[in-house]
Amino acid sequence: MKPRQKLTLILSLSLVFLVTLIATLFIITNGKKTNPENNTASENQSEQPKESEATPEESPEETPTSTEAPASLVPDVNPTTASLPGGNCTTPLGKLMLINANFTVDGNFISSRRNQLIDLTATYGITEANSWNGVPLLDSEAASHLNDMIVAYQTAYPGHTMQTMSCFRSYGTSCGRLCAPTGTSEHHSGYTCDLIDTAYGNSLDTDYYAQHIDWQWLKQNSYKYGFIDRYPLEWAGSSMSEPLNVNANGTTGYYETWHYRYVGIPAATEIATGKYNNGAYDSLEHYLKSLGLVKDLQSGICN
Ligand SMILES: [Zn+2]
């Protein structure tokens, strides 16, 4: 072979090699661009850190989880209340627990729940209007939200003070229609307070509702702080028949304009705006049934 021919051959081979190399590189680069979609699942489960540049592109594709609106409100089991003895099938739900005539708790639950609560006066300076009731006790998350709510009320009405008129209670009351016997009272939950601004009177009586700016303000605003009007008139059920229990549809048997219950802001918003009640204020009973968290409101069955 002549040197010239040799050179031509070498040049041709180099050219072929270069073209092949470029083609290979092109295929690899293109392949990388399309692959992340397929890799997403396995990357998330096993080794994410390797391709950090791919992560920002992937995140929009993961959003389907958060668009499932109902899932966000199905509560996790709350280890704090789930561990308590003597509860009912809803007490593991924590702030969505139901305590009424058909979903009862026993003395073990009541005494152990008491130990999980904090002193509202010592922590936030919130005072109890009736000294006979002792120190006002509440769940710490609920207490923090109650404090925010009271501050908002007192800012809206300078010079006024919102007080509790019994929060946690170890014992029920047995005075008939407006009272709940031990084991059936929501005051055992640690999420409830009766509230009052004594500037508008110091008795808990629905006849004075029209004069109570505090109760009207609470009805309008409490859900923003995770609290609900727990016993609105619309859900009281048939009047004055005793004993008044919860019916299958979700009546409460009570009408108490001062009784507020912490359920967390998302649930409170859905209850106050009637997501499952055609836009009208819901009852906790009816709400839980609509969510499928309780099955039978009369026999106290969850599933
Ligand atoms: Zn009450």
Image (cartoon, helix red, strand yellow):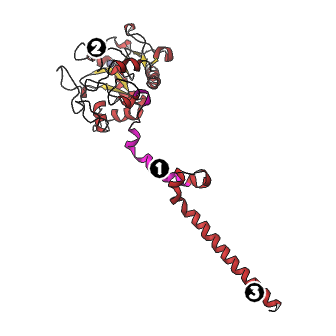
Which of 103 and 281 lies nearest the eye of the viewer? 103
x, y percent for residue 139: 43, 23
- Which quarter of the figure has residue 132? top left
Q: Residue at x 67, y 74 (%)?
A: 21
Q: Residue at x 53, y 51 (%)?
A: 44
Please give the range of residues in magenta.
57-81
Residue 55 covered by magenta stretch: no
Tell me the kind of residue under disc 2.
Thr
Identify the image quadrant of the C terminus. top left
- Which quarter of the figure has residue 186? top left
Residue 67 covered by magenta stretch: yes
Q: How many marks?
A: 3
Q: Circle 2 is placed at which residue position?
A: 173
Tell me the kind of residue under disc 1.
Thr
* CA distance for labels 2 and 1: 49 Å
Q: Circle 1 is placed at which residue position?
A: 63
Dot 2: element: loop
Q: Residues within 10 Å of mark 3 (few under 14, many from 20)?
A: few
* CA distance for labels 2 and 3: 105 Å
Disc on res. 9? 3
